[in-house]
Image (cartoon, rainbow, N blue to C red):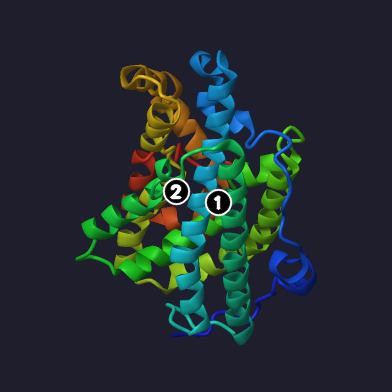
Amino acid sequence: MAVLTRNYHSPFSQWNRSSWIRSKPMRRDTFSGLPFSPELVPLAAHPKILENYHYWITLLAYRLLAHLRFTSLLELDYINPVCHAITQGKLLVELSTQQKIDALRIYCDEGGHALFVEELAGQLTENFAIAEQIVTRPKFASVLDTIIEENKFNVSPKLIHLFFVTISETLITRTLNYIPKDMRVASVVRLVMSDHALDEALHNVYFRELFPLLWNALSSTEKVVIGRILPQLIWAFLDPNQELEYHILVQGLGLKPNLVQNMLQEIYTSEQVIRLVQSEARHTLKMFESAGVFTFPSVEEAFLSAHLLTGKVDA
């Protein structure tokens, strides 16, 4: 392994003062406000939901619970094992001591995030009397399992996990940006989301700098294999979980299955889903372009087929 990190500038110089786990309290308060921003829940705008306040507010509560469960699993089962591997020097490239220490800082942050989202989930279920068992394992986990199984003879699961985590830490999703500014949302939710967003902004910088090092450490053959998997990893993370929303509407709200199927088809047209994924992936796609990911024709074709490229990536 070659040392490729001589010019590394740590984004964590103020970590002791800025990180939640080092400097901020656990957020506890009554739910005096919405549990989630309705603009981030396409189904919340459906006429069937809008006509019944109980449906509307309960759907928003379930959407928050799904986000919290998604976050907890992602941090503990996916991001932290990768951060542990980085601190142990088990990567494609040899990183500096400072980069390894910063990965351990991220490890601490992510453990803290899992703690505060689980605390918030408890407050949420108590306030809105929603059934926790309806929100099962996040979709990305089963999709990632399938991707790993389909590529088990071409690339190691650890390498796929590594690139999945790099993607997840560089995607800038609307939830963490929007909710802290939405004064209709309960203050306890806004504060937790703000704490999370501030930490993740530094993680984004770290992994954005790490990605080209990882990519350039691959052989040409590995770049083609991994490059064709990257768009699948983006979709695994960003694709709306319609199966979960079906269960929320049927089991959580008591709506008829046929009605729910029609509602999902009306809300989630392929064009709308593609636009959403393209929008939230744009910064990560720009990172790929800068690293030279699209220089391989078969990789570029994989992104085009996944509706993630329409030519040059927009700035």
Q: CA distance from mark 1 to mark 2?
A: 9 Å
Q: Where is residue 152 shown, x and y percent of the image? A: 22, 64
Residue at image coords 41%, 40%? 134
Q: Amino acid at mark 1?
A: Leu
Q: Which residue is more in the foreground, 108 or 28?
A: 28
Q: Earlier in the sequence, mark 1 or mark 2?
A: 1
The quadrant where residue 240 appears: top left
Residue drawn at x 58%, y 36% as measured from the top left: 128
Q: Residue furthest left?
A: 153
Dividing the picture into quadrants, the one containing residue 245 is top left
Mark 1 or 2: the one toward you: 2
* Quadrant holding the N terminus: bottom left
Towards the viewer: 125 or 73: 125
Q: Is residue 173 above or below residue 268?
A: below
Using the rendered image of the protein, determine whether residue 313 is visible from the camera's viewpoint.
no
Which residue position is annotated with label 1?
Answer: 171
Identify the amino acid type marked 2.
Answer: Phe
Percent position of residue 72, x then y = 51, 57
**Residue 17 marker:** none
* Disc number placed over residue 237 in the picture, else none: 2
* Quarter that holds the C terminus: top right
Residue drawn where x is 53% and y is 30% of the image: 59
In the depicted structure, whether residue 308 falls above or below residue 198 = above
